[in-house]
Each structure stands twice: as structure tokens, then as C-alpha cells.
Image (tube, rainbow, N blue to C red):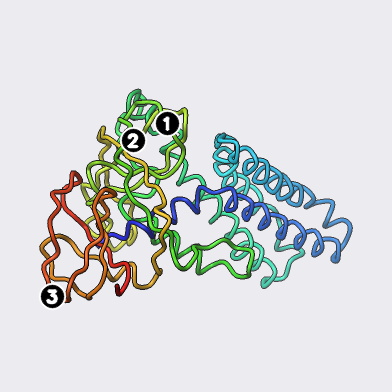
Amino acid sequence: MRNLNLEAGIWNLFASAEFFEAAARECDDTMSWFGTLAVSRSAANYGRNGQIYDVCKKWAHDFRRGAELARLGDFKSIWNTAGYVSGDVHGMLEQPLHGWMTEAEYKEFSNIRISRILKYAGRIEAVLNNAMVGANSFFDPDPDCPERSNDDDGFPGDDILRWYDDYKNSQKGPFFPVLPDPLSEYVVDRTIACETGEEVPQTGVWYPITGLERHSLTFAIKGLRMQPAFRIIKTTEELRTADCMFPSPETVAVATTWHPLIPSGRTVTVDTNEELRAKAGQLCPKAGIWQSTDPAAARRFYKAGEPMADLKSAYGYTVWQWVSDR
């Protein structure tokens, strides 16, 4: 069962100014570590590799500047910054670092510190890709590679859960932003609708009228054109081979209607939220107060084993979420 609140929380986290600032702090830490190590070995080493220090400094500045602009609604700068980091890393690691670093130091630099920066950059780029260029790709495909318009360059399906777990498990310390527990509860606001290609009326996470089965949420930016939804036609499991264990899902872009997801003001715990969800027709797994993901629906009390009601949801089927004992 898909976990709407968890997925929405991660989309909001990855697209937040706090997450962008955390990327800047990671760059600051790596810059300081690298500079101290290089100077301790010899001034010549520092001079030769000063460009690496300067690149880290530039990353930190650009991530921080991107966070400032994002707070004002402009995400282009942070998206561009996230996109060029991997290219910079490729050139950085071609430097003769083994000539003055120990093997342990090189592994800490490349496998830990630079890897963490790449994780930030990759999450930021992916969470913004479709908002920035999804509509352009859908309505004006590249004539040299028109099939690319069907590729979901964000987080297909519920793939964002895997990327969040990978991020969370690789980061240590109190300054790395993670999801709160309890989570915010989100509801679909059907009073606002935006069709693919229309101007987005507000920035945030949006829900497709297709429902989430083989689809994903998305992050959309006010003033830009709304992107298509991406339907998964072949999953990672269906595409997996011995040579490629984690291929990206195969997707197709479809025009659809989107509604914003908004916080209800209530919270749900991280652990029980994912377990205590049920579709209409299923037997209630736990007695208590349940809330439909349809925002207009009233809460209901269900006994354990009682069938969950079908509210004839416009999104295909009714999903209930456990809220409290009473």
C-alpha cells in the first residue's frame, strides 16, 4: 500500500531550502577537511590541488545562494547547481590525489565526503527536473531523441522512498535534515486543479488524478507550466537482468489533471502510518478512527474486521488511513 504522507514528506524535504542549505554545509565541511589535509602535507600539494578547494567553496556558495532564491520561489539556480556537480566531481577525481593522500584518506574523500555531496545534488536535481523541463519535453520533444519525452527524470512510482532511505543511511550528525516523527498528514485539495501545460498556481507537491498506482507525486513550481504524469509500464523488477540489477522503470508521459497536497494540520506517526492503511472493501486491521485520503470525507470509527467503506473516490478507489484509537 502506498504511503501518501511519507512520500509527500520526502518530496517536500528534497525540495526545501533547508535541504539545499544542508548541501552547502556538506561542501563547507569537505572544503575545510581537504584544505587542512593538503596544507599539512606541503604547500606545493595545496597549490597543485587548490582548484579542488575552490570548487568545493563554489559549490557551497552556489547551494546557499540557490536556497535563498528558492525561498523567493526561484528554483532555477539550485537546479543548475545540482546539475553541474557530477561533472565537476569527474574532473576532480582525475587529479593525482594518490600521490600525496594515503589510501584511507582518498577513500574518505571520494567514497564518503564527495559521495555525500553527490547524494544531495542528485536528490535536488531529480526532485526539480520535471518541474523545470517536464512540460517543455512533453509538448516540444527533442527531434533528435523524441523518446526521451517519456522518461521520468524524477522519482518514478514510489522510488523516492528508496532514495530517501539511501540518503538517510549515509548521513550522520544532527545537521542533516530528515523527516519529522510524527509526519505531517497531507490531503488532496480538489478545490484547485491544474492541467498538464497550464500555468502552475502554487509551488508544492501535487497529486495526479490518475491516482498513485504506477504513478508518482510531483513537485511543481508557481509560474511554470505543469508537467505530465509518468505512468510506469515496466517496473525495475520486470526490467532487472543479471548485468543490471536496478534499472530505472520504463515510463510513458501522459497529460493529466493535478491537485495540490496540503497539510491537514494533523500528524501521523512514521511507523504506524505505513502499516495502518486499507483500501475500500478490505477488513479493518485495527479498531479506531480512520480518515480517507479524500479531503472532503469525514472521519469514521471502524471496528477490527469491519469492511472499509467505498466513498466512490474520483481517484479510482478509496484509501483509509488509521488516525487514533478514538
User: Quarter of the image holding residue 9?
Assistant: bottom left
What secondary structure is marked by label 2? loop
Asked whether the beta carbons under mark 3 and mark 1 sit within 8 Å of each other, the answer is no
Between circles 2 and 1, the one closer to the viewer is 2
User: Which of the marked residues, 2 or 1, is nearer the chain's N terminus?
Assistant: 2
Q: Position of residue 192 (x, y in %)?
A: 34, 35
As drawn, the label of residue 252 is none
Which residue position holds label 2? 192
Contact, mark 2 vs mark 1 (Cβ under 8 Å): yes
Can residue 143 be spotted in the picture?
no
Q: Earlier in the sequence, mark 2 or mark 3?
A: 2
Give the residue pinned by disc 1: 201
Q: Which one is earlier in the sequence, the residue at label 3 or at label 1?
A: 1
Q: Quadrant of the C terminus?
A: bottom left
Report crowding for label 2: few under 14, some 14 to 19, many 20 or more residues within 10 A (C-alpha). Answer: few
Residue type at numbered disc 2: Ile
Please state the horizontal and vertical placement of residue 48, each as a whole percent of the image.
Answer: 81, 51
For the residues carrying marks 3 and 1, which lies nearer the camera in this image? 3
Near-viewer residue (53 or 25): 25
Left or right, 315 with respect to 53, comes to left
**Does any portion of residue 199 appear in the rendered image?**
yes
Which residue sits at x=46%, y=64%?
A: 166
Disc 1 residue type (three-letter): Pro
Residue placed under numbered mark 3 in the picture: 305
Q: Does 39 sit above or below residue 172? A: above
Give the residue displayed 57% in from the left and 34% down from the top.
74
